Amino acid sequence: MCGLSGILNLKKNAVDAAMIHRMSNCMAHRGPDADGFYIHDEIALGHRRLSIIDLSATANQPMFEPSGRFVLIFNGEIYNFREVKSQLSGYPFQTNSDSEVILAAYQKWGADCLQRLAGMYVFVIWDKHSRELFIARDRMGVKPLYYFHSEEYFLFASEVRALIQSGVVPAKLNQQAVDDFLEFQSVPFPHSIIENVQQLEAGAYIKIAAGKVETTKYWDLTKSKVDFDFEDRSMVQQEVRRLLQQSVERRLISDVPLGAFLSGGIDSSAVVPLMAQASQGPVNTFNIGFDEKDFDESEYASLVARKFNTRHNAVRLHPTIFLDELNNALDSMDTPSGDGVNTYVVSKQIRQSGLTVALSGVGGDELFAGYPFFAKYYKLKQHENWWKLIRPLRKLGAGFVGLNGNVQKDRIKQLLQTDEVSIEECYPVFRQILSPRMISKLTTHEIQGQGLVSEQLHKYQKAIDKFPYLSQVSIAEYLGYTQHTLLKDTDQMSMAVTLEVREPYFDHDLVEFVLNIPDKWKLPTYPKSLLVESLGTLLPPEIVHRKKQGFLFPWSVWMKKELKNFCEDRLERISQRSFIRSGNLKDRWHRFLKGDESVRWMELWLFVILEHWLEKNNVN
């Protein structure tokens, strides 16, 4: 796991070395073990290394293949690199690293090497002979890549802040991105929070030659097909178990000790026993507990830890400790996000224990229909003809739904007004934090047309419609919240404390299989029943049959007490910005403090986060 950056002068002028050093230095937290640069004529590459596989200095980057033609920088892990290496018998390997396997694979197969790699990655290869630049991102979008393209420059980096540090990219706020952030708590592909900075799409690569920039999609989630007999439920469950076990085992490849997040929920509790079965010694597990009982899951985490004899580390998080860490967490955000602080706190505890790598249970809900809106969408699709038939009545009824600043009623109104039950119309409503109407009320922005999430779903609508209903929601999740919030937060907040996090539920082989499972096997009879039953007796019943809590901090309590001044200061300052309707935002804050249940804490927290990030990064 590392941080990478690069500059290509499209006019073939020499690159100023100071630029790439500034970009790389601001990402030192991503790779404290080594830094390296390749600077020659119009190209400059920078790399920060966190040593995980082959800890020797010979595996440092930039890395060169023997002829000297290709230069590599790489962020991530190739989990099947030994398997791929066995197919490259003619290459004179000098290291035991996965990085060198990428070089050898690209030399032999070119861009087709991507079809053979399993992992999380962004890698960059410069061809010194043809003067071509090649940049690839992993299938699921676990590792980030941002870029800036002008007439003179093509700049790229693992973090937005690195691009700003170059001195070439203006620190100007992308106003459209603000709307997306307020609606979905993050900024979707292809934009970023900075104007003219974009994200490389997951499962895609960029090739730049002779000044021409071309992007190619090499893997498409909506085209995943599996040759399997899905009518045999027992066989389906066995294959889920096999693929999940394979995914966990892939992610245990490391030359440094590993640990695991253990919240006490089904997803993380399923990963730990599979780790235990594949490990030589006890697994290191970590849990965060709270004094507020409604949010505390530590007793369930301890139950799993005892059953599988892990080295368990339980940390009690008091508000005072949280306040001490809050500024550190927010300052670590490369891009603003409504989530992620919890990941920072747990990651820091694991890193302080001496570990460098940890497995996480994120992604289980998205894959195994763990959220309530999976069932809601399924029911709507079951009654789709009826829904269309009563369209005039729905439209009429929408006019009688009171708003009064209630986001939940906003959602109902939007659903009643939909023309049909389709994933591109329903999913954005399910996932909204603030509705377009509410954003227009709190900002000076007039929201018109579809947002980026809706555009992406509309683009893939025909392909998505071929999948089972529950899988349609999973695909929407991957194109929306999962990629742009969950994975982005996991990366930026764990790497802020120099911890590599690996997510077994985002293994592309597992994802492709589960997306093709019929609804009759996946529809939960109890929370994530397909996952639970596929694991047999591994999970204790106390973990399975209990109220879902999720890994959440008690924000609604803290924002009215310990965090009240912190929030109020930032809400006051953002209210002074030209795009904010000051009176409406302050009124909403006062209603929240008085206990108005129609005002949710997250709606206000987004403005707090945004202001903190803008100030920290001097963005206007």
Image (spheres, grey):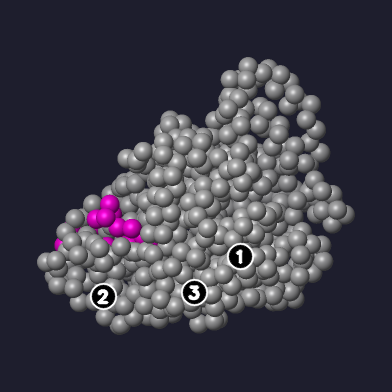
> Would residue 136 appear left or right of 352 to someone viewing this image?
left
Tell me what residue is drawn at x 53 percent, y 70 percent. Answer: 308
Q: What residue type is labelled 2?
A: Asn
| Residue 115 on the magenta span | yes
Location of the N terminus (image quadrant): bottom left
Q: Determine crowd level at label 1: few under 14, some 14-19, many 20+ residues with C-alpha closer than 10 A.
A: many
Residue placed under numbered mark 3 in the picture: 283
The span shown in magenta is: 113-132
Tell me what residue is drawn at x 64 percent, y 49 percent. Answer: 182
Tell me what residue is drawn at x 55 percent, y 62 percent. Answer: 269
Residue 539 lies, in percent from the top left, at 56, 60
Q: What SS does tag 2 mark?
A: loop
Q: Which of marks 3 and 1 is nearer the N terminus?
A: 1
Specify the label residue 263 is tagged with. 1
| Residue 500 on the magenta span | no
Residue 450 lies, in percent from the top left, at 56, 36
Q: Can residue 481 be seen in this view?
A: no
Specify the label residue 590 is tagged with. none
Cα separation, mark 1 vs mark 2, equals 34 Å
Q: Earlier in the sequence, mark 1 or mark 2?
A: 2
Corner quadrant of residue 506: bottom left
Corner quadrant of residue 74: bottom left
Residue 96 lies, in percent from the top left, at 26, 75
Q: Can residue 360 be seen in this view?
A: yes
> Would residue 272 appear left or right of 601 to someone viewing this image?
left
Q: Which amino acid does label 3 sit on?
A: Val
Specify the label residue 96 is tagged with. 2
**Tags 1 and 2 in contact by the CB under 8 Å rule?**
no
Q: What SS does tag 1 mark?
A: loop
Location of the C terminus (image quadrant): bottom right
Q: Determine crowd level at label 3: few under 14, some 14-19, many 20+ residues with C-alpha closer than 10 A.
A: many
Q: In this view, does 373 lie above or below 73?
A: above
